[in-house]
Image (cartoon, helix red, strand yellow):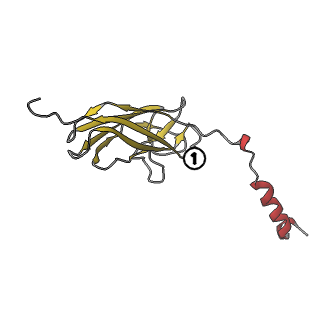
Amino acid sequence: MTMEKSPFAIVALLIACSHVDPAAQPKRPQAEIAPIVETARVAPGGEARLSLHVKLPSRMHVQSNKPSDPLFIPTVLTVDVPKGVTVAEIIYPSSERLKQDGLKDPLVVFGSEFTLRVRLKVASTVPPGELVVPGRLRYQACDDTTCYPPRNADTKWSLQVAPVARKGS
């Protein structure tokens, strides 16, 4: 009986090949993220500015938020605003063009260190006190030869909604 015709041999081969030693797997690069509150106090009805500083291991990059190929995984910041707060704008940094061997067109990427900026509008009905704004960065780190599985990095910003000043005080 040949291996091509033996169902047992095929199943045994599949089982043997399916075991992957976790130590042999390349380590998934992880970004260091730092949430920065640029507007520590905001009045109801005002605007707040936040940013997220991202640092990847040296010689790594991520696809921009608008990659050159729709099959590439974009870098996306999602901000989960609390009630009474809206995202006015998420500002991505300027992208870089990166020529890769084997690709006709250069990649549109963010380098190993970049900052995303967020503008929030706070409704006049938001009560004074602490305002916590959660966010999530989705990215796929790549080096010159490998793109690693995508990751999510959760973060949050905390700022104060200031009490409304009373007239005549």
Residue 35 on image: x %, y %: 41, 33
Position of residue 50 relative to residue 75, above or below, is above
Residue 153 vs residue 105, the one in the foreground: 153
| Quadrant for the C terminus in the image | top left
Q: Name the residue under label 1.
A: 149
Q: Quadrant of residue 165?
A: top left
Residue 94, visible in the rendered structure:
no
- The answer to whether residue 49 shows anywhere in this view is yes
Above/below status of 94 relative to 151: above
Judged from this view, the residue extending furthest toward the front is 169
- Farthest right residue? 1
Amino acid tagged 1: Pro
- Nearest the camera: 24 or 41? 41
Picture quarter containing residue 44?
top left
Q: Is residue 47 positioned above or below 8 on the image?
A: above
- In the image, residue 7 above or below residue 124: below
Quarter holding the N terminus is: bottom right
Q: What element carries label 1?
A: loop
Q: How many labels does the image show?
A: 1
Q: In this view, does 44 lie to the left or right of 79?
A: left
Q: Position of residue 124 (x, y in %)?
A: 20, 44
**Residue closest to the eye, 155 or 128:** 128
In the image, 153 versus 75, the foreground residue is 153
Give the percent coordinates (x, y) of residue 151. Answer: 53, 45
Q: Which residue is drawn at 22% across and 47% down?
A: 125
Residue shown at 55%/37% (left/top)? 30
Residue 88 percent coordinates (x, y): 26, 45
Category of crowding for the residue at label 1, using alpha-carbon neighbours closer than 10 angstroms: few (below 14), some (14–19), many (at least 20): few
Decide if residue 84 is on the left or right side of residue 9.
left
